[in-house]
Image (cartoon, rainbow, N blue to C red):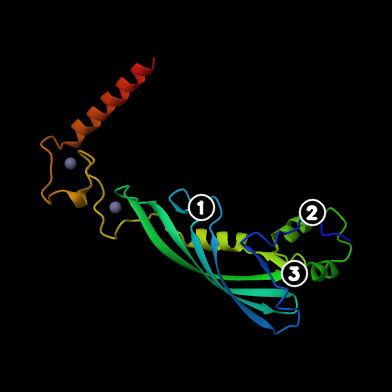
Amino acid sequence: MTVSGHRLDPRQPLVVDTHELGRRPGSMRRVTKTVPAPENLGTPVAQVPPGSDIVLDLRLESVMEGVLVTGTAQATLSGECGRCLEPVTDELEVDLQELFVYSDERLRGKPGSGSHNGAGVADEDEEPKMVEDLFDLEPTLRDALVLEMPLTPLCNEDCGGLCAGCGARLDDVEPDHSHELADPRWAALAQLRTSAAGTTEEN
Ligand SMILES: [Zn+2]
Ligand SMILES: [Zn+2]
């Protein structure tokens, strides 16, 4: 019997081999390693740069159903300040916890799983599984990091943002920075004219 087309490649940096851990419940092993960040890890406002270092400190514990993984991941975050648009870099540390169940254990627990019952199949796909002695930490790592990413990254908590009149970064200009024509109605009108002009140019 073969594992249905879902083999894991032990050379992938986020695929962890539990061969040395064994399957005796209670045995433990610590794994620390630095892996390159996978592509497209982040949100529209903050990302872990692809290839940057992610430091993993994991504890693998053999339990009845599979391998329980707990630990931390440290990654570098880069994004844009939500107020002034300056580049922001930050360190992010997240907790990881996941139970990877043995595939054979799973089959035994669900007799007659040959049927194509929609709900049942979806459930199985959600469950992180061991493939032989290997598991893939990537989905767990992604979920944990994305969950902890700031919705609005800031260059600092007190960032003053941008001047509505000229777009200058307010932290970089004199405290009494102001404009003669600060009347918002004029600013709105000027903006309308600019966008109207833009439209005409296109035609
Ligand atoms: Zn800022
Ligand atoms: Zn200004």
Q: CA distance from mark 2 to mark 1?
A: 27 Å
**Looking at the picture, which amino acid does disc 1 mark?**
Pro
Tell me, yes or no, if residue 151 can be seen here: no
> Quick one: label 1, few (<14), some, or many (20+) residues within 10 Å?
few
Determine the image quadrant of residue 76: bottom left
Q: Please, what secondary structure does the residue beneath circle 1 have? A: loop
Determine the image quadrant of residue 203: top left
Q: Please, what secondary structure does the residue beneath circle 2 have? A: loop
Locate residue 1, reporting x and y percent: 89, 61
Locate residue 89, reporting x and y percent: 37, 57
Q: Quadrant of ligand 2?
A: top left
Between 196 and 32, the one lying in front of the other is 32
Decide: is 166 above or below 93: above
**Looking at the picture, which amino acid does disc 3 mark?**
Asp
> Quick one: label 3, few (<14), some, or many (20+) residues within 10 Å?
some
Residue under label 3, please give it: 133
Residue under label 2, please give it: 5
Q: Are marks 2 and 1 in contact (CB under 8 Å)?
A: no
> Quick one: label 2, few (<14), some, or many (20+) residues within 10 Å?
few
Determine the image quadrant of residue 59: bottom right
Locate residue 175, reporting x and y percent: 12, 52
Mark 2 sits near ligand 1, with its Cβ under 8 Å away: no
Horizontal side of 90 relative to 84 (left or right) equals right
Horizontal side of 161 relative to 15 (left or right) equals left
Residue under label 1, please give it: 50
Mark 1 sits near ligand 1, with its Cβ under 8 Å away: no
Q: CA distance from mark 3 to mark 2?
A: 16 Å
